[in-house]
Amino acid sequence: MSEVPAFTIGIEEEYLLVDAGTRDLDADPSPAFVTECHARGGGQIGHEFLRSQIEVGTRVCASVGEAIDDLRRLRRTVAEVAGLHGLAPVAASTHPFAHVRRQKRTDKERYVALAEEMQATARRMLICGMHVHVGIADNDTRVDLMNQMSYFLPHLLALSTSSPFWEGEPTGFRSFRTTILSALPRSGLPDRYSSWGEYQRHIDTLIRTGLIADTSKIWWDIRPSWRYPTLEVRIMDCCPRLADSACLAALVQSLLRCLWRLRERNQQWRHYADLLVNENRWRAMRYGVEEGLLDLARGELVPFATLLEELIELVREDAKVLGCLAEVEQARSILARGTSARRQLSTYELARAGGADEHAALVEVVDRLVAETAADL
């Protein structure tokens, strides 16, 4: 029997910075804002690609509960400092009506290089996400679990969706953020590798030829972290409700432990064609939890509620061991009240039906996002 992975957990989230008066993004907040956040947050809060964004990252934590406590502290810190500067953070993946052409890039060497290489694609990166790191030290185990975990990424995306608007337009997508990310190279579902050695040989080719400097330029939905001995699940939208972030983190951690447990029994989650997994990914982007996904074992579309119950049962044993079963079961609440994308659209539709013009309705959506982000802090 191989060594049991640590299954430690860390969470990164990116927030949008809203002007408290206009409810539009502040394209150029005071440098003092980020400096104070960084100091108060113990170095765990910093710049993102655009100045109207900010990123937080928890410490390495032993449990989901510990990680969410740290995330709550970081959210609270950002909210308190933002309030002193006439701002409010929004934990959603797109802003309902902000325009990309009005945003300003953060002046850091890494971001300057990214903008130069990616051109118009980079200029559209007015998006935020949630990344969950799970500690798995053994390289071959990490690659094997990455291969197997790809099947479940659409399910996680569907539960997290929070980006239905783009530059004032209801897009018809529940996660429009994912369409923006898909324009990047080395994005989407990862390739499958038989071993860490095979994965590393491919990465070394990209580095040796100067196409990438390091694996931070690999933007797959899940990847071996370039800095830590972790698997980093990156497909999720950012959730306004902290309880939803906790649920997604718990599902990620529990799924990886479940797949490791099966691996120890010489079992593998069956590999399905990328064509079919990508179909589920697209359906999650388009519909969230409101339509079914393909059950690839049955070969038929199945309502998301049915898939969710099967998923909870699949990881129940592991969630109990990890102490996060309550957080996993919170997924039922997400389904019952709708994801952030559904709530945003409902707010917009209700405001329009009540006589609000388009901009006023979108402002109401921002108000709801600000309130939900600030709740439970």
Image (cartoon, grey):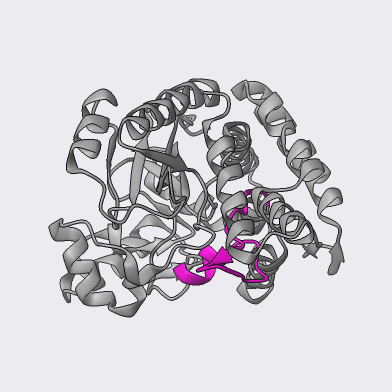
Total numbered badges shown on the rendered structure: 0
Is 332 on the left-hand or right-hand side of 283? right
- Taking the spot 21% from the left edge, 61% from the top edge, the residue there is 111
- Taking the spot 55% from the left edge, 49% from the top edge, the residue there is 366
The front one of 128 and 159 is 128
317 over 217 or under it: above or below: above
The front one of 165 and 5 is 165
Residue 41 image position (x, y, % from top left):
29, 26
Q: Residue furthest left?
A: 109
- Taking the spot 69% from the left edge, 26% from the top edge, the residue there is 325
Which image quadrant is residue 368 in?
A: top right
Residue 124 image position (x, y, % from top left):
39, 71
Residue 216 image position (x, y, % from top left):
29, 57
Is 106 on the left-hand or right-hand side of 343? left
Residue 103 image position (x, y, % from top left):
31, 63
The answer to whether residue 172 is magenta is yes
The front one of 292 and 202 is 292
128 over 179 or under it: above or below: above
Which image quadrant is residue 10 in?
A: top left
What segment is highlighted magenta in the picture? 159-181
- Taking the spot 37% from the left edge, 40% from the top edge, the residue there is 87
The answer to whether residue 10 is magenta is no
